[in-house]
Image: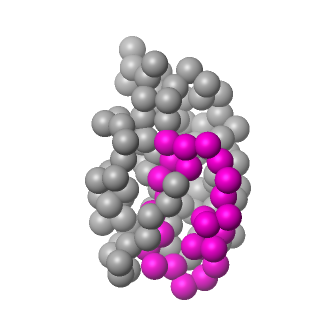
Amino acid sequence: MLCFSIVVPVYNESKNIINLINEIYDQDLQNYNFETIFVDDRSTDTSLSILKSIDKNNFRYIVNKKNLGQSHSIYNGIKVAKYDTIVTLDGDGQNDPKDILILLKYFFK
């Protein structure tokens, strides 16, 4: 089975997290083993409490020790990823989760 990790850095994205998670998990990903890692960059809104409340298979979150920015947050997510293939998404929904399947079809040809 094909495996990949989704890494999503978030900073003050409380208004976007639930919708983004639903969009990710609404994809037809049953032919893949995947995990979703959200990296909270020390949000000052309710992002972290929302992440703590998520109950989805293969979902986890980590929290940066201090605010480090998007690139470092992605790096921290990659460091803890279970799989070598990484898909990154932006926490504000600018990257469409529907593109995951398109990317995977090309990558795993």
* 21 to the left or right of 90: right
Could you tell me if residue 16 is visible in this image?
Answer: no
Query: Image quadrant of residue 50?
Result: bottom right
Tell me where the magenta segment starts and ends, as one range: 35-59
Which quadrant of the rendered structure holds the C terminus? top left
Please give the name of the residue rendered at 38% of the width and 73% of the height, measured from the top-left corner.
64
| Magenta span includes 77 | no
Instruction: Give residue 53's position: percent from left, percent from top.
Output: 67, 64
Considering only vertical position in the picture, is 5 above or below 77? above
Instruction: Give residue 32's position: percent from left, percent from top.
Output: 52, 25
Instruction: Give residue 74's position: percent from left, percent from top.
Output: 36, 58
Considering only vertical position in the picture, is 91 above or below 41? above
* 24 to the left or right of 82: right
Give the camera-side residue of 90 and 9.
Answer: 9
Instruction: Give residue 70's position: percent from left, percent from top.
Output: 38, 66
Circle count: 0
Residue at the bottom extreme of this rendering: 44
Please give the name of the residue rendered at 35% of the width and 78% of the height, measured from the top-left corner.
65
Query: Image quadrant of residue 24?
Result: top right
Q: How is the image coloured?
A: one colour
Considering only vertical position in the picture, is 104 above or below 34? above
Could you tell me if residue 101 is visible in this image?
Answer: yes
* 84 to the left or right of 87: left
Give the camera-side residue of 41 and 35.
Answer: 35
Please give the name of the residue rendered at 39% of the width and 20% of the height, measured from the top-left corner.
108
Give the camera-side residue of 72 and 62.
Answer: 62
Please give the name of the residue rendered at 70% of the width and 38% of the height, measured from the top-left corner.
26
Considering only vertical position in the picture, is 43 above or below 84? below
